[in-house]
């Protein structure tokens, strides 16, 4: 049986809805998230955009790693919040996510941060289904795991090989209390602990 990410985290925490106003204020809906898009692993928290339409993709639609049946070059943007950490194979997943993008389209991916969310502990303290971890600061050689991705050294080269250029990488810690101790702050209504990577397809 193939595991298909979806209603594990994003649909419970509503990480997408939390940042609607933030993304609107920094013009993400004008710059990246407009036209025809797909929200992979959305659960009940599908992305809402100002211009265009978004196709929700979740467990019932198929394997998020393969996107079987989705034509090449179908979308102006591919959005995924808190799904990539659940997949079996990151390079294969990104290959298919890039495949369904039009040239000039944007891949907009949000993942939990290894320091803020995982607390630099593996397996994950807060989600036993996390198969991958991601960081802006902590390199793979430090954690000594092939399923850990430093954005600059591990994730960006994969995207480059797929004909994509990273145009923005943002550390998102809105509402995060650095003095609050070890617990899952993303369960709070307005707190996130994540990384947002945006890449443009050549």
Image (cartoon, rainbow, N blue to C red):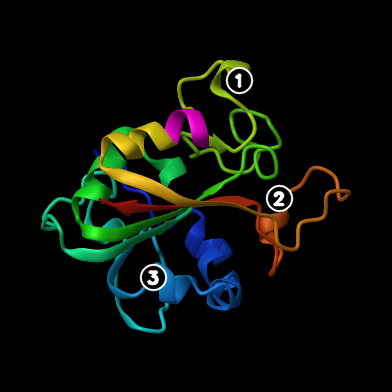
Image-based side of 47 in relation to 145, left or right? left
Name the residue located 59 percent from the left edge and 25 percent from the top edge: 139
In the image, residue 8 lies in the stretch drawn in magenta = no
Closest to the camera, between mark 3 and mark 1, is: 3
Name the residue located 71 percent from the left edge and 50 percent from the top edge: 184
Q: Are marks 3 and 1 in contact (CB under 8 Å)?
A: no
Residue at the disc numbered 2: 184
Badge 3 or badge 1: first in the primary sequence: 3
Residue at the disc numbered 1: 143
Residue 33 circle label: 3
- Name above or below for residue 52 compared with residue 150: below
Name the residue located 56 percent from the left edge and 63 percent from the top edge: 15
Locate residue 85, reporting x and y percent. Answer: 46, 42
Q: Main secondary structure of the magenta part?
A: helix
Badge 1 or badge 2: first in the primary sequence: 1
Q: Which stretch is magenta?
A: 149-155
Label 3's element?
loop
Locate residue 47, reporting x and y percent. Answer: 42, 72
Q: Are marks 1 and 2 in contact (CB under 8 Å)?
A: no
As rendered, which of 167 and 7 lies closer to the eye? 167
As rendered, which of 55 and 37 lies closer to the eye? 37
Label 1's element?
helix
Residue 94 circle label: none
Name the residue located 12 percent from the left edge and 55 percent from the top edge: 72
- Name above or below for residue 27 compared with residue 40: below
Closest to the camera, between mark 3 and mark 2, is: 3
Locate residue 200, reporting x and y percent. Answer: 34, 54
Image-based side of 33 in relation to 178, left or right? left
């Amino acid at each position: 049986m193939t595991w298909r990410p979806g209603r594990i985290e994003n649909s419970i925490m509503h990480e997408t809805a939390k940042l609607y106003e933030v993304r609107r204020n920094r013009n993400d809906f004008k710059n990246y998230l407009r036209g025809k898009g797909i929200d992979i692993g959305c659960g009940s928290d599908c992305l809402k955009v100002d211009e265009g339409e978004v196709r929700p993709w979740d467990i019932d639609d198929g394997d998020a790693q393969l996107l079987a049946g989705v034509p090449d070059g179908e979308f102006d943007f591919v959005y995924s919040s808190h799904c990539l950490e659940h997949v079996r194979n990151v390079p294969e997943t990104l290959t298919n996510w890039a495949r369904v993008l039009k040239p000039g389209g944007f891949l907009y991916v949000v993942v939990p941060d290894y320091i803020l969310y995982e607390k630099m502990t593996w397996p994950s303290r807060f989600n036993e289904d996390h198969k991958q971890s991601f960081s802006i600061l902590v390199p793979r050689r430090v954690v000594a795991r092939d399923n850990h991705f430093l954005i600059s050294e591990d994730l960006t080269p994969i995207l480059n090989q797929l004909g994509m250029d990273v145009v923005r990488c943002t550390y998102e810690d809105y509402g995060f209390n650095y003095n609050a101790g070890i617990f899952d702050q993303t369960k709070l209504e307005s707190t996130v602990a994540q990384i947002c990577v945006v890449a443009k397809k050549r």
